[in-house]
């Protein structure tokens, strides 16, 4: 299965957890180029944690909001992200940190991006079993606070799947700048709610394999797979930077928003 070079392909034994046999090389380059401990040095008080532990957020001494999204699974962001936006609504800028992000649900992606959209926006194209799926465009939320101040999205080679989709959508907005390094490159959608497009198969041995049956395209028509999403401003960061107690990508974002 690793020969497919598909970061969404996995197998599992009966009663076991999913095993992903392939990771993109950019993930290995950047997986230690981020540390939540180093991030905390840029704040004068402890960061807040959502009830699900899926997001950590706070405000810097310069009145810049910050949120680290660690999980796009379940429905956590649908219920918790509105509270985060309310907390940072009066900041002069916002940093959305989705480095070290594997994947999750499209509903959680929508829960995040909908808080920044002020006009109708087409969704990235998605195909299942080679067929283009019709989708309604994003619509601005009515009677809901929309964050319109400058936003920086932090990404790196470990940003993957739902994290990449979130980045690509937010990059279409005029007040958003993506900073960091190119994402991992995983645009396959494993399945949707229909049995016809499920990518999971049970083998006679009792093992289960999953091979994606769909994929997303970037707005420029290219697939996410293998090529990822490039930043608007590339700031390389290494494991040594983190060992030296510096997050250069975070520092650039703060400077940009000051």
Image (cartoon, helix red, strand yellow):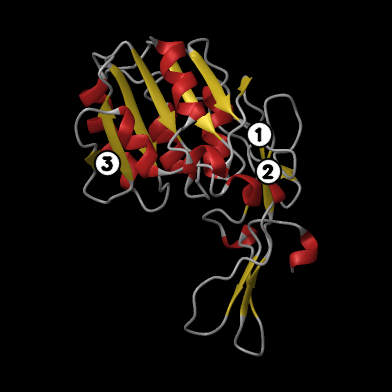
234 vs 81, left or right, is right
Q: Name the N-terminal-most of marks 2 and 3.
A: 3
Q: Quadrant of residue 184?
A: top right
Contact, CB < 8 Å: mark 2 with mark 3? no
Q: Residue at x 67, y 89 (%)?
A: 204
Mark 2 crowdedness (10 Å alpha carbons): few <14, some 14-19, many ≥20? many
Mark 3 crowdedness (10 Å alpha carbons): few <14, some 14-19, many ≥20? few
What label sits on residue 182 in the rendered view?
A: 1
Q: Give how far apart the Cα atoms at labels 2 and 3 are.
A: 28 Å
Q: How many marks?
A: 3
Which structural element holds mark 3? helix
x%, y% of residue 215?
A: 68, 45
State the residue lying farthest toward the bottom. Answer: 205
Pick the front one: 247 or 125:
247
Which of label 2 and label 1 is nearer to you?
A: 1
What label sits on residue 79 in the rendered view?
A: 3
Q: Quadrant of residue 83?
A: top left
Contact, CB < 8 Å: mark 2 with mark 1? yes
């Amino acid at each position: 299965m690793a020969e497919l070079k598909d970061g969404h392909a996995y197998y599992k034994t009966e009663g076991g957890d999913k095993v992903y046999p392939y990771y993109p090389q950019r993930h290995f380059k950047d997986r230690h180029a981020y540390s939540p401990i180093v991030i905390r040095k840029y704040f004068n008080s402890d960061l807040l944690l959502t009830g699900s532990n899926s997001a950590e957020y706070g405000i810097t001494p310069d009145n810049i909001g910050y949120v680290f999204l660690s999980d796009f699974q379940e429905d956590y962001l649908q219920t918790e992200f509105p509270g985060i936006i309310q907390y940072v609504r009066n900041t002069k800028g916002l940093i959305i940190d989705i480095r070290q992000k594997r994947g999750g649900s499209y509903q959680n992606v929508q829960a995040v991006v909908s808080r920044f959209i002020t006009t109708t926006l087409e969704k990235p194209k998605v195909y299942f079993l080679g067929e283009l799926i019709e989708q309604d465009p994003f619509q601005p939320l009515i009677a809901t606070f929309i964050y319109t101040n400058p936003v920086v999205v932090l990404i790196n080679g470990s940003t993957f799947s739902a994290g990449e989709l979130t980045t690509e959508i937010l990059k279409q907005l005029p007040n958003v700048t993506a900073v960091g390094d190119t994402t991992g490159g995983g645009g396959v959608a494993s399945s949707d709610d229909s049995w016809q497009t499920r990518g999971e198969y049970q083998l006679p041995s009792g093992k289960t394999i999953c091979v994606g049956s769909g994929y997303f395209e970037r707005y420029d028509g290219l697939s996410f797979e293998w090529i990822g999403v490039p930043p608007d401003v590339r700031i390389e960061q290494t494991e040594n930077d983190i060992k030296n107690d510096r997050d250069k990508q975070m520092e650039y974002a703060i400077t940009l928003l000051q």
